[in-house]
Amino acid sequence: MAAGGVNLPVTDTLAVQRQLKTGLARPPFLALLADALGRAGRVDEGLAAVDEGLLHAESTMEGGYVAELHRMRGGLL
Protein backbone atom coordinates (compact mmCIF):
# COMPACT_ATOMS: atom_id res chain seq x y z
CA MET A 1 0.00 0.00 0.00
CA ALA A 2 1.42 3.38 -0.91
CA ALA A 3 1.08 6.26 1.51
CA GLY A 4 2.52 9.60 0.57
CA GLY A 5 4.86 8.01 -1.95
CA VAL A 6 6.14 5.51 0.61
CA ASN A 7 5.50 1.80 0.23
CA LEU A 8 3.98 0.69 3.53
CA PRO A 9 3.13 -3.03 3.38
CA VAL A 10 2.99 -2.96 7.17
CA THR A 11 -0.33 -1.13 6.90
CA ASP A 12 -1.72 -4.20 5.14
CA THR A 13 -0.54 -6.39 8.02
CA LEU A 14 -2.15 -4.08 10.56
CA ALA A 15 -5.41 -4.09 8.58
CA VAL A 16 -5.44 -7.90 8.51
CA GLN A 17 -4.80 -7.99 12.26
CA ARG A 18 -7.73 -5.64 12.76
CA GLN A 19 -10.01 -7.80 10.58
CA LEU A 20 -8.99 -10.96 12.43
CA LYS A 21 -9.42 -9.17 15.76
CA THR A 22 -5.94 -10.18 16.82
CA GLY A 23 -3.18 -7.96 18.10
CA LEU A 24 -0.34 -10.43 18.39
CA ALA A 25 2.91 -8.56 17.84
CA ARG A 26 1.04 -5.36 16.98
CA PRO A 27 3.46 -2.93 18.73
CA PRO A 28 6.46 -3.87 16.53
CA PHE A 29 4.38 -3.34 13.39
CA LEU A 30 3.20 0.02 14.69
CA ALA A 31 6.81 1.01 15.41
CA LEU A 32 7.73 0.13 11.81
CA LEU A 33 4.80 2.18 10.57
CA ALA A 34 5.78 5.14 12.77
CA ASP A 35 9.33 4.99 11.43
CA ALA A 36 8.18 4.92 7.81
CA LEU A 37 5.74 7.77 8.37
CA GLY A 38 8.40 9.84 10.09
CA ARG A 39 10.80 9.30 7.18
CA ALA A 40 8.03 10.48 4.86
CA GLY A 41 7.63 13.67 6.90
CA ARG A 42 4.27 12.57 8.30
CA VAL A 43 5.25 13.12 11.92
CA ASP A 44 1.75 13.50 13.37
CA GLU A 45 0.67 10.19 11.86
CA GLY A 46 3.87 8.57 13.10
CA LEU A 47 3.19 9.82 16.62
CA ALA A 48 -0.37 8.47 16.39
CA ALA A 49 1.04 5.04 15.47
CA VAL A 50 3.37 5.21 18.49
CA ASP A 51 0.43 6.14 20.74
CA GLU A 52 -1.61 3.22 19.39
CA GLY A 53 1.31 0.86 20.01
CA LEU A 54 1.75 2.05 23.58
CA LEU A 55 -1.97 1.76 24.31
CA HIS A 56 -2.05 -1.73 22.85
CA ALA A 57 1.01 -2.79 24.84
CA GLU A 58 -0.52 -1.44 28.04
CA SER A 59 -3.89 -3.10 27.51
CA THR A 60 -2.40 -6.49 26.58
CA MET A 61 0.65 -6.40 28.86
CA GLU A 62 2.76 -6.93 25.72
CA GLY A 63 5.59 -4.75 26.95
CA GLY A 64 8.49 -6.13 24.98
CA TYR A 65 8.45 -3.26 22.50
CA VAL A 66 7.57 -0.35 24.79
CA ALA A 67 11.14 0.96 24.97
CA GLU A 68 11.40 0.98 21.17
CA LEU A 69 8.11 2.85 20.89
CA HIS A 70 9.39 5.50 23.32
CA ARG A 71 12.63 5.75 21.34
CA MET A 72 10.58 6.15 18.18
CA ARG A 73 8.53 8.95 19.81
CA GLY A 74 11.74 10.78 20.72
CA GLY A 75 13.01 10.46 17.16
CA LEU A 76 9.79 11.84 15.74
CA LEU A 77 9.76 14.83 18.09
Image: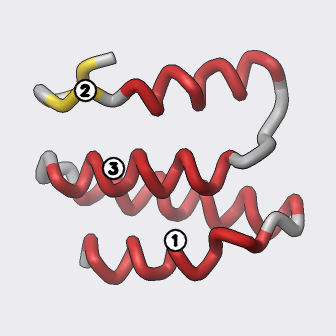
Which residue position is annotated with label 2?
7
Callout 2–callout 1 Cβ contact below 8 Å: no
Mark earlier in primary sequence (3, 1):
3
Q: In terms of secondary structure, where does tag 1 sit?
A: helix
Task: Check disc 1: other Cα within 10 Å, few if <14, some if 14-19, many if 20+.
Answer: many
Categorize mark 2 by other alpha carbons within 10 Å: few (<14), some (14-19), many (20+). Answer: few
Picture quadrant of residue 27: bottom right
Secondary structure, mark 2, is strand
- The CA span between labels 3 and 1 is 14 Å
Residue 22: image x %, image y %?
Answer: 83, 32
Picture quadrant where residue 51 is located: bottom right
Name the amino acid type tagged 3. Answer: Glu
Q: Is residue 45 left or right of residue 23?
A: left
Q: Amino acid at mark 2?
A: Asn
Callout 3 secondary element: helix
Tell me, yes or no, whether the two marked residues, 3 and 1, touch with CB atoms within 8 Å: no
Q: Where is mark 3, residue-wise? A: 45
Q: How many marks?
A: 3
Quick one: quadrant of the N terminus?
A: top left
Residue 62 image point, x, y percent: 81, 64
Residue assigned mark 1: 69
Instruction: Please report the residue visible at 28 percent of the width from the left and 47 percent of the height from the top.
Output: 36
Marks 2 and 1, the one that precedes in the sequence? 2
Dot 3 or dot 2: first in sequence order is 2
Residue type at numbered disc 1: Leu
- Kindly check if marks 3 and 2 are in contact, taking CB atoms under 8 A apart as contact: no
For the C terminus, the image quarter is bottom left
Considering only vertical position in the picture, is 22 above or below 64?
above
Foreground residue among 14 and 59: 14
Q: Position of residue 60 (x, y in %)?
A: 88, 59
Residue at the location (69% across, 63% down)? Answer: 55
In the rendered view, how is the structure colored? Answer: secondary structure
